[in-house]
Structures are given as structure tokens and as C-alpha cells.
């Protein structure tokens, strides 16, 4: 079983880091005000405002910011400001044995999913495919905040994961499988193949989502994972939304599901609201889950934090 971080409570301190691409200072400051209005204290990483083109800072600098948050005994949760690109560059510089001995809530999506899955695999830590600092704004749906705080601030178990009203989960290939749930952004995982930190799908329930890619490119990514054995090895598959993914050659995302994913013949659920879509279900990476496409349910079987 993976290690559960300590529960997040009002008044706790959240560490803010920028681990991939930079974010404007005014946006960071506005979002921090929202966190503080919710009753949290905030500690900022040394390079949280840094700018170095498409990266916030060097790989070693960004990694050092993250490790400082794990070393700070006052920090209860670690929240990246955004994703972007370059998160895979920091994972070789992290002290996984130290992290395993000092587990904390780590949350994010997009390119941050490289980190979430690395922390699960190498530090045996449950992490959270959920909100980043950029999401803490007045226009964020209440569903997203409810999901985040249910996952990080309650010990409810088992817990059925449900889309927001009006968005149904869709079961495509029948099956009933149990295993750790892993995954996140498709393009990020394809970019990590062939490295020591690539996704290990053996016996896992694999979640994938994507954004801003034409469908022929999404097909290329999916096929790359297939050829790398990632679908062969997994127990089941969950496809999230492909947000702003434009059709190509008269094919759309639904065509890709029907023509590429269903023939894999793995238990398959689609239309999960998470990641880059407006609605963001909180997925605890590394937690034991049950995917039952006979009754169209996805259930987290264990608490994902401890008191």
C-alpha cells in the first residue's frame, strides 16, 4: 500500500512552487489571496516568480525549491503554480528516500503528472491529480474545490468518484478490475518514455487526458504508448476529456475511442472530467481503486490522507 500524506486542515501552510513553465507574478499573487481567504497560510519557493523563457528556472533550481518544501516542517501541502513544460527535468534531482520519510500532499495536473507518478513510484507516496495554484480563482466551479478538499481533507472510504451533474461516465469495454490508479497527461507520458522515470502500468488502472492537440497527434501519442506495451500491461483504462482537441482528417476524439481504444479490449471507461477541462475530478495517484464497467463506477477503496 502507498503512503498517505497527512490530512489538510484550515490554518495549515501550503508551499507554492513553480516546477515547469513560469506564471505571471500578478496571477500568482491573486491566487495566493484566494488561498489565504480560505484560511491557509502560504510559503513561497525561492524561484516561484522566476522566468527563463519557457521554463521558470534551471532543473536543479526548480528541484531544490520542491525539496525545500519537503524539508520545511511547517509545510503541510505542496502546490505548483502551474504545469507547462519541463517538469520531467527535475525528477532526477529529487531525494526520494527523504520524501518517503517526510510525505506531504502534492497536487497538480498537466505536466505536473510526471512528478505525481514519479513520487508514487519512487517514494511510494499517494499524490493528487487535482488543482494547482492557478485554479484558485472565483470562476473555478465549486465542484473542483469540493473534489480537492474531499480528497485531501477527509478520510472517507470507500469513495465513489462522480462527474459533475449532466456529465455521465461512459463504460465502453466490460470488466471489473482493482489496482492502483495512475496516469494523467498523455503527451507528458509519451515524452517520458525511454527514461528511468517512464510510467509503469503493470497491474495499474491507467488514466489519460489531453489538451490542445489535433486528433491525429493524439492518435500518434496513443499508438506510441501501445507500442511501448503500456496498454498491454495495465489492468484497465480511463480516458478523460480531450479538451480543445480539434478533429483531423474527418476524425474526432469519439472516433479515436471507437477505433483505437475499444479494440485494445481492456476494461474501458471514458468521459471522466479531470485535468484540463473546466471540471476537475480529484484522482489520488497510487491509491487502490476499483474500475467496474459493468455498473459504470469508479471507486477509491482506501482513505487517501491520514489524521
Image (tube, grey):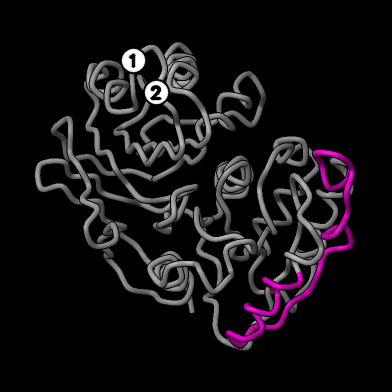
- Examine the image and state in which quarter residue 255 appears: top left
Measured as percent of width and height from the top left, residue 225 is found at 47, 19
Question: Label 1 belongs to which residue?
Answer: 250
Callout 1 crowding tier (Cα within 10 Å): few <14, some 14–19, many ≥20: few
Q: Residue at x 79, y 58 (%)?
A: 24
Quarter of the figure with residue 29: bottom right
Q: Quadrant of residue 233?
A: top left
Per the model, the C-alpha gap separating discs 2 and 1 is 6 Å
101 left or right, relative to 23: left
Q: Is residue 43 magenta?
A: yes
Whether residue 249 is visible here, answered yes or no, is yes
Task: Return the residue nearer the eye: 50 or 237.
Answer: 50
- Cβ–Cβ under 8 Å for marks 2 and 1: yes
Magenta stretch: give its range: 29-57
Q: Is residue 275 left or right of residue 169?
A: right
Residue indicated by mark 2: 247
Given residues 4 and 37, the one toward you in this image is: 37
Residue 167 % position (x, y): 24, 53
Q: Is residue 275 magenta?
A: no
Identity of the residue drawn at 44% across and 49% down: 277
Residue 6 picture location, percent across and down? 55, 73
Q: Residues within 10 Å of mark 2 (few under 14, many from 20)?
A: some
Is 132 drawn above or below residue 61 in the view shown? below
Q: Is residue 159 left or right of residue 276?
A: left
**Label 2's element?**
loop
Task: Decide: is 2 above or below 262.
Answer: below
Amino acid at each position: 500500500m502507498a503512503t498517505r500524506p497527512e490530512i489538510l486542515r484550515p490554518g495549515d501552510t501550503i508551499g507554492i512552487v513553480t516546477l515547469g513553465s513560469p506564471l505571471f507574478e500578478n496571477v500568482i499573487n491573486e491566487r495566493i489571496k484566494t488561498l489565504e481567504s480560505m484560511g491557509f497560510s502560504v510559503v513561497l519557493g525561492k524561484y516561484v516568480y522566476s522566468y527563463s523563457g519557457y521554463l521558470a528556472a534551471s532543473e536543479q533550481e526548480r528541484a531544490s525549491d520542491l525539496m525545500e518544501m519537503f524539508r520545511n516542517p511547517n509545510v503541510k501541502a505542496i502546490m505548483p503554480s502551474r504545469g507547462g513544460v519541463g517538469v520531467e527535468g527535475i525528477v532526477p534531482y529529487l531525494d526520494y528516500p527523504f520524501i518517503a520519510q517526510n510525505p506531504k500532499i502534492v497536487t497538480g495536473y498537466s505536466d505536473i503528472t510526471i512528478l505525481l507518478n514519479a513520487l508514487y513510484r519512487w517514494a511510494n507516496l499517494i499524490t493528487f491529480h487535482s488543482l494547482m495554484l492557478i485554479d484558485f480563482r472565483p470562476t473555478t466551479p465549486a465542484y473542483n474545490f469540493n473534489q480537492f478538499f474531499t480528497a485531501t481533507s477527509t478520510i472517507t472510504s470507500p469513495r465513489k468518484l462522480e462527474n459533475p451533474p449532466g456529465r455521465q461516465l461512459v463504460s465502453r469495454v466490460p470488466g471489473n478490475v482493482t489496482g492502483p490508479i495512475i496516469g494523467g497527461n498523455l503527451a507528458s507520458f509519451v515524452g517520458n518514455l525511454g527514461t528511468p522515470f517512464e510510467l509503469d502500468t503493470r497491474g495499474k488502472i491507467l488514466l489519460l487526458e489531453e489538451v490542445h492537440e489535433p486528433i491525429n497527434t493524439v492518435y500518434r501519442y496513443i499508438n506510441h504508448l501501445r507500442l511501448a506495451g503500456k496498454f498491454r500491461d495495465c489492468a484497465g483504462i480511463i480516458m478523460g476529456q480531450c479538451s480543445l482537441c480539434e478533429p483531423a482528417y474527418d476524425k474526432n476524439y469519439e472516433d479515436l475511442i471507437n477505433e483505437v481504444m475499444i479494440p485494445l479490449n481492456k476494461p474501458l471507461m471514458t468521459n471522466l472530467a479531470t485535468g484540463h477541462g473546466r471540471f476537475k475530478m480529484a484522482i489520488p495517484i497510487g491509491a487502490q481503486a476499483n474500475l467496474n464497467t459493468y455498473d459504470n463506477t469508479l471507486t477509491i477503496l482506501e482513505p487517501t490522507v491520514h489524521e
